[in-house]
Amino acid sequence: MLPNEGTATTLPAFPRLILASSSENRKMLLGRLVQRFESLDPLCHETPRPGESPRARAHRLAELKARSIAPGLENCLIIGSDQVAGCRGRILHKPETHDRAMADLLWSAGHRIDFWTGVCVLDTRTGEKRSCMDHTRVWMRALTRAEIERYLAQDEPWSCAASFRAESLGPALFRRMVTRDPAALIGLPLIGLSRLLREQNYPLP
C-alpha cells in the first residue's frame, strides 16, 4: 500500500483574490504574479476632494475601490489601486479627447510629472487592510506641437493619466524616469503588492 493511499488529501484553503478594477493593464500586471484571480468593477465615484493632494487622493481611492466591492464577499483578498499624476501644481486627469491630451502634454513638456500609485489589499475575513504607495517621477522632453500630434495619432491615450501610454510609445516622450517599480507607471506596483500579499500569507514565490 502506497503512503496516504485511500486517504483524502486536504489542500490549503487560500482566499480568493479579487482585483477591484476594469483596467486591462492592471489585469495584465496582476497576471504576472498569480495565475488565478477575479476582477470586478469598483462601485464608487472617483470625485476629487477640494485641496486634496495627488498622493492623498491615490491613497484614498485605492482603499475606496477595494471597500466598494467588499460587501457580501467572504474569504477574499481584494486589491484596489489608483494612480494620480501631478505636474506644476495641476492634476493631469485622463484626457478623454484629443484636445485635452494635447493641452496636457504641452503643459508637461520639459517638466517633471509625479505619479502617485496607491495599492490597498483588504482582507474580508478580518476586515484588515494593508496599503502601500509608489512615487514615480518622469521628466518629459521639450516637445513640439508636431511631435505631440504624431504621438497622439499613434497611441490615442485618451484613457491614460497624463495623456501617454507608458506600456506603449509613451517613453519616447521621456527625458528621464526615476522609479522603484517600473510596473507602477503602467498602473499597479508589483513590488509593493507582492509584499502586501506575502504579509497576508498569500503564497507567492
Image (tube, rainbow, N blue to C red):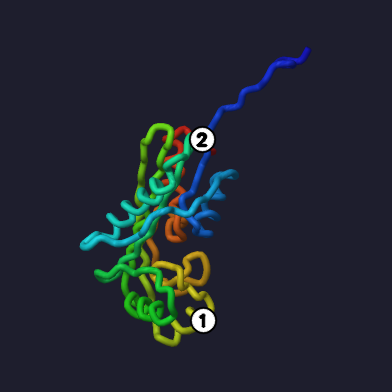
- Specify which label sits upstream in the sequence, 1 or 2: 2
The amino acid type found where label 2 is placed reads Pro
Residue at 24% from the left image edge and 59% from the top image edge: 52
The amino acid type found where label 1 is placed reads Ala
Query: With respect to residue 106, does 195 lie above or below?
Result: above
Q: Which image quarter: residue 205? A: top right
Foreground disc of the pair 1, 2: 2
Sort mark 1 into few (<14), some (14-19) or many (20+) by Cα contacts within 10 Å. Answer: few
Sort mark 2 into few (<14), some (14-19) or many (20+) by Cα contacts within 10 Å. Answer: some
On screen, residue 51 versus residue 5, left or right, reads left
Spot the residue most to the top: 1
Q: Nearer the viewer, residue 10 or 185?
A: 10
Give the numbered dot on residue 153.
1
Give the numbered dot on residue 15.
2
On screen, residue 20 versus residue 64, left or right, reads right
Query: With respect to residue 144, does 164 lie above or below?
Result: above
Residue at 38% from the left image edge and 70% from the top image edge: 162
The N terminus lies in quadrant: top right
Mark 2: which secondary structure? loop
